[in-house]
Image (cartoon, rainbow, N blue to C red):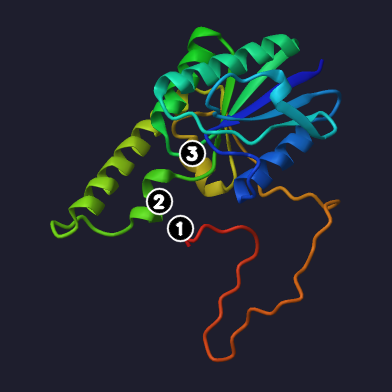
Amino acid sequence: MPVNYYIYSKKDFTRKSAGQSRMICYAKALATKNNKVFLASSAKGPLRITDFHEIEPNVYLQKAVKTAKTPWAKYKFVRHLFHISQQVGGSSVFIFYPIPFLLFESIALFFLKGIKKQKVYLEFNEVRKFGVQFAGQYKFGQPVYSIKKLIFIGTSSLSIRLLPYYDGVICISTSIEGFAKKYNKNTLRIPILTDRLTTRINSPNSYRSRSAFNIGFAGSICDSKE
């Protein structure tokens, strides 16, 4: 029986990133046997079925959006997404792609699973409380940094406490899988996905400098983390 999947996030899936690429690979893999997959970004204002366009067979991407910022706007986005699932009909599964925003995650999980009794899964792509964005030590001489680090670790630790309430957790590595299973036994590891049919364009430019030490990256990176 076909299933409709709704991958939702605070992330804008129209923008190129490692997360966007992974979720589109998810969508292509899921969009078989008449399954439909909708990639939805937390939007400001009404969310309608006409806001999605088909980018691959049975894969629908929400058009570029202005991100919902207030708690009420985020609640309305989740509510609208649920209503769209009712319009599409059939069996529904929701997958949350996490961005460090505890309030949005809590609202969505409470509404979709707690109130509407939907199946909700989590793409758990990193153990965020150990994030290298705040790898330095607390210092009295750096009060702003120290406060940000405290808030980051605090909210990330609280979000981990939500893991048991998901129907399942999807992760990318054995290390994260081992961590997630402490909180949710229904944890599935899906390694990095690639699309061998995608046309790759290689730049003829050379970025190697003979006068400096060179490090090469393959794939998408985030400067603030690397």
Q: Does residue 139 appear left or right of residue 208 in this picture?
A: left
Residue bearing mark 1: 225
Residue bearing mark 3: 99
> Where 31 falls versus 147 (above or below)?
above
Q: Residue at x 63, y 39 (%)?
A: 13
Looking at the rendered image, the quarter that the N terminus falls into is top right
Is residue 30 visible in the rendered image? The answer is yes
Instruction: Determine the image quadrant of residue 215.
Output: bottom right
Instruction: Determine the image quadrant of residue 202.
Output: bottom right
> Where 91 falls versus 170 (above or below)?
above
Name the kind of residue labelled 2 in the image.
Gly
The residue carrying pointer 2 sits among few (fewer than 14), some (14 to 19) or many (20 or more) residues within 10 Å by Cα, namely some
Point out residue 94 in the picture as x, y percentages from the top left corner.
62, 23
Q: Nearer the viewer, residue 167 or 196?
A: 196
Q: CA distance from mark 3 to mark 2?
A: 12 Å
Q: Earlier in the sequence, mark 1 or mark 2?
A: 2
Residue bearing mark 2: 131
Name the kind of residue labelled 1 in the image.
Lys
